[in-house]
Amino acid sequence: MLLVFDGDCGFCTTSARWIQRRLPHDVGVEPWQALDLDQLRLTEHDVTSAAWWIDDSRGNHRGHAAIGRALIAAGGVWSLVGRLLITPPVSWLARPGYWLVARNRHRLPGATESCRL
């Protein structure tokens, strides 16, 4: 399992490091810039527009579903939060909520100019 994020974005990096501290040690958290995107079957557009959760047994998940899967993998109370994020009707709100944050990440704490989509 692997969480892929935009390493050029300060907000994304801070968020990725937060979840990394809660994930089991066998789960990877990597910036897309350090990965072979062809091997993951992702494009640069894919990874600059959303976070990705790569899980060979369940496939690839993007955006709110990626965050939900990462939270599930973290376990504990975070697992419940993750399950809510990917289950309707909460997922119906989580998806546009994720895109709202993603489109405005350059305005969030820790963000840099490279956070602009």
Image (spheres, helix red, strand yellow):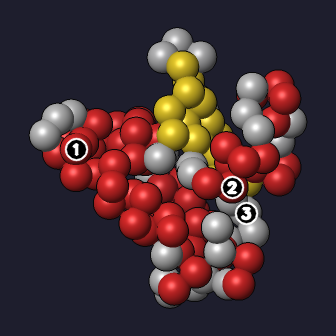
- Residue displayed at 57% across by 41% down: 52
- Residue displayed at 59% across by 16% down: 56
- Estimate how packed mark 2 is, as few (under 14), some (14 to 19) or many (20 or more) residues with alpha carbons within 10 Å: some
Q: Position of residue 100 (x, y in %)?
A: 40, 66
Q: Position of residue 66 (x, y in %)?
A: 47, 41
Query: Where 33 falls versus 115 (above or below)?
Result: above
- Name the residue that disc number 1 marks: 92
Q: Is residue 39 left or right of residue 55?
A: right
- Estimate how packed mark 3 is, as few (under 14), some (14 to 19) or many (20 or more) residues with alpha carbons within 10 Å: some
The answer to whether one can see residue 53 in this image is yes
Q: Element under label 3? A: loop
- Check the picture and name the quadrant holding the C terminus: bottom right
Q: Position of residue 73 (x, y in %)?
A: 41, 36
- Name the residue that disc number 3 marks: 7
As drawn, the label of residue 48 is: 2
Contact? badges 2 and 3 (CB < 8 Å): no
- Mark toward the start of the polypeptide (3 vs 1): 3
Q: Rounded to the nearest whole Å, what is the CA distance between mark 3 and mark 1?
A: 27 Å
